[in-house]
């Protein structure tokens, strides 16, 4: 009898367990919010990307319900076949207006937006240069494209320029890809410098605004607005599933780029269109962000308050550099991170351990939301003070 071709899986799982890299789901009951029920216990939620607290907003729910009643639960096909609805175009127009780009294109997720856009704009005769801390979707999009793929050290403009000097002349096209906010660290890409170096070396720039959409910038339009780079030529990717409380992704850019992606992005052409309720919820969220700027202001008051308390009461903690709503406490090992995460949970704080291979070093990742109250933040710091002697 031939050996079982699947018998390697069990030993691989054992290796994952041994390294303290094993992962499993944690079930949340009820609506998302600043506090949630986790395993039947109420905990303060510092694990969510729902930065503005919109995922549980009744107005998004009602928009989704109305869309279901009008268009049904699913789009039934790709946009080029039976899947296109008027509301899809309405949302694309709203995104383009908000981002101040000529046009935008909806995808069924932010991951698919990255895969499709990258695979469409470069190919086998081209070069991709990627920040080493980029999200999996950016890296996998680079692999899918078939272009030569090289990484540069995190946010290191000098190293990127050196690679461009060395390699750019050997390729037809070049694409620089980067997150705007690095989701497991909280720091920002050096966007103005990346734009300048892209122009200098005749290279395109793709920026993933997943964790800056509705978070950074005066109107929440993202990293481009934050750095006063609105209007410059760049491929902007974003998500509807984080601060906008829905599902889906988008590409925003020039009308020519968007028209090209409609014809060449495989994850748009061959994927069922975003469902009507998700589309309607995202459209409602954008309207709320624009009509209620106090939500964004409250988010940043919460971020500043937590930073102040950590600096004043826990100066010995190693806090990774951050300019976003993500604050990470670096820890010496995966085992310590797991222990700290469990200790926090036992004290009513949900802030999970993030470990390799997701990140190079283990940490506790804290995400702030506009819906957090001052008491929530104070309790987090109080619990950290009690348990910090162990790390």
Image (cartoon, helix red, strand yellow):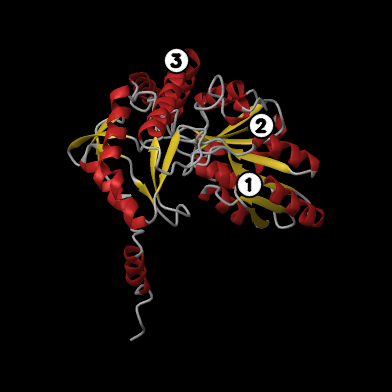
Give 298 or 134, whichever is nearer the viewer.
298
Quadrant housing residue 54: top left
The outermost residue toward the top is 291
- Residue farthest along the bottom direction in this orientation: 1
- Of labels 1 and 3, earlier in sequence is 1
Residue marked by disc 2: 253
| Location of residue 85 in the rendering, given as x and y in whole percent from the top left corner | 51, 28
- SS of the residue at dot 3? helix
What is the C-alpha distance between the residues marked 2 and 1?
14 Å
**Between tags 1 and 3, which lies in front?**
3
Residue occupied by mark 3: 294
Which residue is depicted at the point 75% across and 37% down?
A: 196
| For residue 323, above or below residue 16 | above
Is residue 27 something one can see in this rendering?
A: no
Q: Are marks 2 and 1 in contact (CB under 8 Å)?
A: no
Residue beneath label 1, please? 118
Q: Secondary structure at mark 2?
A: strand
State the SS at label 1. helix
Task: Classify mark 3: residues with Cα within 10 Å, few (<14), some (14-19) or many (20+).
Answer: few
Expressed as whole percent of the image width and height from the top left, the position of residue 24 reads 30, 52
Which residue shows up at 38% across the image and 22% down it? 60
């Amino acid at each position: 009898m031939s050996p079982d071709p699947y018998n390697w899986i069990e030993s691989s799982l054992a290796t994952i367990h041994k390294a303290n890299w094993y992962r499993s789901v944690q079930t949340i009951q009820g609506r998302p919010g600043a506090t949630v029920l986790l395993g039947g216990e109420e905990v303060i939620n510092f694990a969510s990307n729902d930065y503005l607290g919109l995922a549980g907003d009744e107005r998004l729910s009602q928009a989704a319900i109305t869309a279901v009643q009008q268009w049904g639960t699913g789009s039934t096909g790709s946009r080029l076949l039976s899947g296109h609805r008027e509301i899809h175009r309405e949302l694309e127009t709203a995104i383009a207006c908000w981002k101040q780009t000529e046009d935008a294109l909806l995808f069924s997720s932010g991951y698919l937006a990255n895969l499709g856009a990258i695979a469409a704009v470069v190919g086998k005769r081209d070069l991709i240069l990627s920040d080493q801390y980029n999200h999996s979707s950016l890296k996998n999009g680079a692999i899918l494209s078939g272009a030569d793929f090289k990484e540069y050290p995190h946010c290191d403009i000098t190293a990127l320029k050196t690679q461009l000097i060395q390699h750019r002349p050997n390729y037809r096209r070049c694409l620089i890809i980067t997150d705007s906010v690095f989701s497991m660290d909280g720091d920002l890409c050096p966007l103005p410098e990346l734009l300048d170096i892209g122009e200098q070396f005749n290279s395109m720039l793709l920026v993933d605004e997943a964790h800056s959409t509705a978070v950074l910038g005066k109107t929440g339009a993202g990293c481009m607005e934050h750095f006063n780079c609105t209007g410059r030529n760049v491929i902007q990717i974003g998500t509807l599933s984080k601060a906008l409380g829905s599902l889906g992704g988008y590409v925003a850019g020039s009308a020519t780029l968007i028209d090209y992606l409609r014809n060449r992005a495989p994850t748009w052409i061959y994927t069922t269109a975003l469902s009507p309720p998700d589309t309607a919820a995202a459209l409602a969220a954008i309207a709320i962000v624009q009509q209620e700027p106090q939500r964004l202001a409250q988010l940043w008051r919460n971020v500043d308050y937590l930073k102040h308390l950590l600096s004043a009461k826990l100066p010995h903690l190693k806090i990774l550099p951050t300019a976003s709503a993500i604050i990470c406490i670096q820890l010496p090992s995966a085992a310590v991170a797991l222990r700290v995460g469990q200790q926090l949970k036992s004290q009513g704080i949900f802030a999970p351990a993030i470990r390799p291979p997701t990140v190079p070093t283990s940490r506790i990742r804290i995400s702030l939301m506009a819906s957090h109250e001052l008491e929530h933040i104070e309790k987090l710091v109080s619990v950290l003070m009690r348990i910090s002697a162990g790390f």
